[in-house]
Amino acid sequence: MSPRLEDLIPDSAVANPQEWAVETAPDAADLPEPVAELPELAADSPLADMPLITVPWPEDDLDLPQLAPLEPEDDIEFATFDEPLLAPPPVLVERRIDDNLVIAYPERAEDFPPRDDFVERFAALSTLEELEGEEANVAQLTARARRDEELLGTLLRIYGYYDAQVSRTIAAPQPAAGTASADAGRTTVRFDIIPGPRYRFGEIDLGNLTAAPDYDELRGAFDIASGMDLSSDRIVEEQVDLDIALGESGYAFAEIDAPELVVDHARLEGDLTMVVRPNGKYAFGGVVSSDPEFLGSEHLAGIARFEAGDIYQRSLELDLRRAVTATGLVSTASITPRRIAEPQGDEPGVVVLDVNFTRAPLRTVAGAIGYGSEEGIRLQASWEHRNLFPPEGSLRVRGILGTQEQLAGITFRKNNFGGRDKVLTLDAYASTLDSDAYDARTVALIGTYERLSTLLFQKPLSWGGGFELIATDEAPASVRESQTPRETYFVAALPGQALIDTTDDLLDPTTGYRLGLRLSPEISRNRGTQSFYLRSQIDASYYRRMSEGVVLAGRVAVASIPGANLIDIAPSRRLYAGGGSSVRGYGFQQIGPRNAFGEPNGGRSLVELALEARIQTGIFDGALSVVPFVDAGTVSVGAAPTLDVLRVGAGVGIRYQTGFGPIRVDLGVPINPGPDDNPFAVYVSLGQAF
């Protein structure tokens, strides 16, 4: 067995190497004699016949001749350099992401233009940033730092920096003199970034896009050209823009291959290849239903927002699919374009849309029970068949049983009748209503035809019109305690309405305005007297975003009923104010003239004002808003509006934003209440107050 190195070294050499070396050094007498002269070479040695070369040492006064200087030549040009051959590294500036993470990048913005966006993006994806506020050991930090270093390299290449350098350091701060190590702070990971030159786009190859008749417009949609700063994000964004442009320009079957980028480090450029195949331009030819007896092809073509012969647009195809789903009659729906004629020269081909859907359950039974301080206990139930009269003809039977209201009614509704979002409704009902203002027993037949705004398509102009035939037996609420006779009114009306809407959202507007007008010429007959009057109202609301998360909203409403005396107008057809959609802080119909018993008597003119600020908070990821408000309103006996007795209410509310609109809870307080007004009122509903 061979001895180990440790066994060959004595302990004395390890303990004191210098002393051991002196003690063990050999004596001079024991050393071999130095060689006095070289041995003679053998006769056959190659060096035996070499002549002896001797060189005499130069004298001390050796004098070398001076070389004559060269004359400069006039035609020689010397290179000059404006910049140093090796540019100094850029000065870096630190930016702390959190307690564990620091990033340093060039101080000058021109050396790293996208730095702000870059750092924000890195902070959102960093694995080290996830440790914010948590203790982590060096091993954890090191592992995460490696992943973050790879992330930085990926992000730099996304922004076009393919020669970037990233250096990583991990430092544990040293405790100050006289302090414990626990007070030294957190271990910090620092990344130094030297981005280097930013690459640019080189050659751009879009395949067969040049075959498209409208190549110039399509190429303009793909906003990438040679010489632009290279960015992977831009490639993705412009690919989407080109795909949209193709789909909106008639190319129903266009194809785009995945982009390929070849980076040339010598040229500092990237050549982009993205093969595009337009596959011909097409026009709409019609709509074909998979279940004609349920939703026929003609009906589906009627709700589409295109006509046969219009150039194909993918957005209109998607809109039709949403409209079919919005009928509530199908559980699934899909649309597939199908060629029926190929393009010929400059003439587009023809494509039809095959609409395939699955029927949904059509019958619905619903019920609700609740209690309100203004309406007491309320039980409500309904049964509905949504396609009893195809296509989209529904029948609904409903009933209400409550302490203040009882109702039985039947409603026929035909959606998309005569066009998209046009609705025909016939409603017949019998009811009794015992409110604080009047007691009414009513039988009515109402018909309307409307063009409505919907969540799918908010229209700048919506309108409606129809008729009302009403027989109602009414009296002031005090008739229950007196012998005052009830009066019967027969009313025929032709109501109409129009709404101009420029707002940005149907349920929660933040900008724009709404201007609405309602007119209802009516004939009323009671006690042998026939009266003609016009119920009219103008509503205007305005919305303005004051800053991020703050919207100011205001509303004005003015109404008038000229043409008849108040006594000749049924109490249920008069004007009232107060309540959650009128003047908050006051009870429903509690503002306005009162009779001898102190009960609301209604009037022939009305003015309502409202102002509120919708302030978004950071609670629940910004879903919760606080809304201070001030409302005011008055009702007058005469047909000309006045502000003689203006009731004012103020308060604060909250809004919780959901996917289908805000949930509203308002607490209002009357500022100048009447003798019978409550000290406060609470309102709960879906959607904004106006």
Image (cartoon, grey):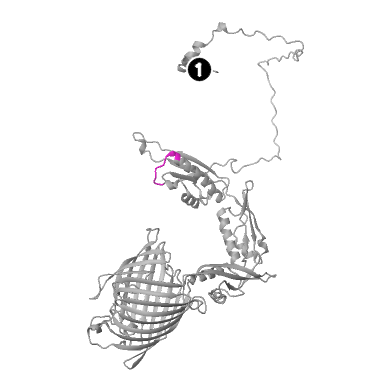
Measured as percent of width and height from the top left, residue 390 is found at: 51, 77
Q: On the rendered structure, is 110 left or right of 606?
A: right
Callout 1 secondary element: helix
Residue at the spot of label 1: 7
631 over 640 or under it: above or below = above
Measured as percent of width and height from the top left, residue 607 is found at: 34, 78
Q: Which residues are magenta?
A: 132-139
Question: Number of labelled discs?
Answer: 1
Q: Nearer the viewer, residue 353 or 397?
A: 397
Q: Nearer the viewer, residue 266 or 529?
A: 529
- In this view, the residue farthest toward the top is 29
The quadrant where residue 278 appears: bottom right
Q: Nearer the viewer, residue 14 or 55?
A: 14
Tell me if residue 135 is in the magenta stretch.
Answer: yes
Q: On the rendered structure, is 311 left or right of 384?
A: right
Residue 26 visible in the displayed image? yes
Other-residue count near label 1 (Cα within 10 Å), few / some / many at <14 / 14–19 / ≥20:
few
**Which is the main secondary structure of the residues drawn in magenta?**
loop
Tell me if residue 633 is in the magenta stretch.
Answer: no
Which residue corresponds to the image point at 60% horizontal and 40% vertical from the top-left? 85
Measured as percent of width and height from the top left, residue 488 is found at: 32, 88
